[in-house]
Image (tube, grey):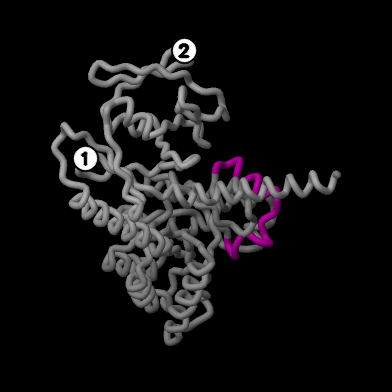
Amino acid sequence: MKRVVIIAIILIAFLIGVNEAAAKEEAKRYIGLHDKMLPIENIYVIGGDTKVLLEEISKHLYIDITKDKGTIKLSKHGKEITLNIPADQEAPSAENPLIFSESGKLLISLKYLANQFEFKLEYFPEYRTLRIYRDAYPHISHIEYKEIIKEHIKKQQRTQTTQTTKKPTVYLTFDDGPNQSTLINHATLEKYNVPATFFFLGNQMKQNESIVKTVSKSGHYIGSHSMTHDKALVYNSSESFIAEMAGGAEIAEQLTGKSANLVRVPYGSKPLVTSGMQKSLIARGLKLWDWDVDSNDWRYTDKQAGQIVKNVQDGVTKAAKSGDKDIIILLHDRSQTTIALPRIIEWLQREGYNFKAYEPDNHIIQNFLRDPSL
């Protein structure tokens, strides 16, 4: 007996899953009003009946909504309908066609609404489209309206294709400046109108204040890469670590007048950054970026700049294929990088990638520690 019950439960669950999947597939419908298509995305098909968000469809049909103590009053041209707000999970009925969606918003039967306010409905099954109309309101024929539907569907498909094929955003980041190579990289970025993120060293900012200000005024983001880049000094203790990282941030803020709360630690966060160091960054309100793509530019000479380009191409391609939508590229302010940079940018532009500098209000989590707080 128990076995029969278990099998029955499994079968019911399977059927429910199939019905839900079918409903989602069937729900890919479109709705039109008179001679136009409506920009309604939330369309549900439940039990063969098309339901839409009450507030959304009411705006298009100019139906006024008034809520009062568990009821909703719908009114248009002197006609009023009062419906009880259903309890959560309550099924719709002929007397009360309202139902809550998964997001907690009220849905209403489109057929019910049309009947109550003297609209007509025409369904075009080949296009999965419902047209709302009134005979008293001038409108084109249903045959002519099919052309409106087809053009709308084509536009939707083009939009979906564009969204699907949209390339990820890339963030060019430069460590170890400011120096003379910073100026060359900056000039290249300006030539191609590309924003970037620079992680400067505190001691070098003190010696190259004009470079810091030039880069900042161009709209690039400047963060801290420590004061000295001295591994023994930076990672000696949590106290020396935060002094190095926060010290660079403070100098950047003083010179630019802008927030510099994003840091990149020397040699990457793992395995050098301890839990105590992590806590010190969080306590200071600093965010941490490592990278997705390592150009390894520091390994090569000027004559080997082509290998830097290839490393970036291979790394970005791999990251994009993995589904990464925000790809952070590690570069340095060095002479070999200045040679490679134009070719890197040109390739990224040809491939359709989007460029951004770090945005403090839209922080992206990318650290080897996998700490969402950073």
Question: Which class describes the residues within 10 Å of circle 2: few (<14), some (14-19), or many (20+)?
Answer: few
Residue placed under numbered mark 1 in the picture: 34
| Residue name at image x 50 percent, y 47 percent | 23
Q: Position of residue 161 (x, y in %)?
A: 36, 62
Task: Please give the residue where the numbered disc 2 appears in the rendered image.
Answer: 69
Q: Is residue 317 left or right of residue 232?
A: left
For residue 332, above or below residue 217? below
| Residue 210 visible to an observer of this rendering | no
The region drawn magenta spans 266-285
Tally of numbered discs: 2
- Which is nearer the N-term, disc 2 or disc 1? 1
Quarter of the figure with residue 232: bottom right
**Amino acid of disc 1:** His
**Image position of 253 with respect to 65: above or below:** below
Front disc: 2 or 1: 1
- Mark 1 lies on a secondary structure that is loop
Examine the structure image and report whether residue 247 is included in the region drawn in magenta. Answer: no
